[in-house]
């Protein structure tokens, strides 16, 4: 699915934050909705430790992934 979205001219500016194997799905039931994060969250996500997840095989302890999961849950995920 990611390859299709990435190749689509309808999507642009895609930034891959994490590419790693995960033990479980973290966004069960996600309906591809849209949610606009505030500037402070965007700054926190941009400065988060995404490389730590690559080194350690992904969640649960990664700060960037946890910030994203928390935002998703607060947004009605």
Image: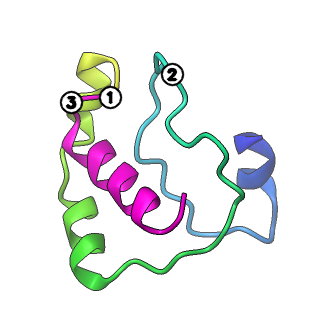
Looking at this view, is 8 or 75 the one in front?
75
Q: Circles 2 and 3: CB distance less than 8 Å?
A: no
Label 2 element class: loop
On screen, residue 47 versus residue 1, left or right, reads left
**Distance between the Cα atoms at labels 2 and 1?**
9 Å
Residue ID at (28%, 45%) = 66
> Where in the figure is residue 42, as x and y percent of width and height?
30, 72
> Where in the figure is residue 55, as x and y percent of width and height?
24, 20
Looking at this view, is 48 or 14 the one in front?
48
Label 3 element class: loop
Quickly name the residue at label 1: 59
Mark 2 closeness class: few <14, some 14–19, many ≥20 residues within 10 Å: few
Magenta stretch prevailing secondary structure: helix
Quickly name the residue at label 2: 24
First in sequence: mark 2 vs mark 3: 2
On screen, residue 53 versus residue 16, left or right, reads left
């Amino acid at each position: 699915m990611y390859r299709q979205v990435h190749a689509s001219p309808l999507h642009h500016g895609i930034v891959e934050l994490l590419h790693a194997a995960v033990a479980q799905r973290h966004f069960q039931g996600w309906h591809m909705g849209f949610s606009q994060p505030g500037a402070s969250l965007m700054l926190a996500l941009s400065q988060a430790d995404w490389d730590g997840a690559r080194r350690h095989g992904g969640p649960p302890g990664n700060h960037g992934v946890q910030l994203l999961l928390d935002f998703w849950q607060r947004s009605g995920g």
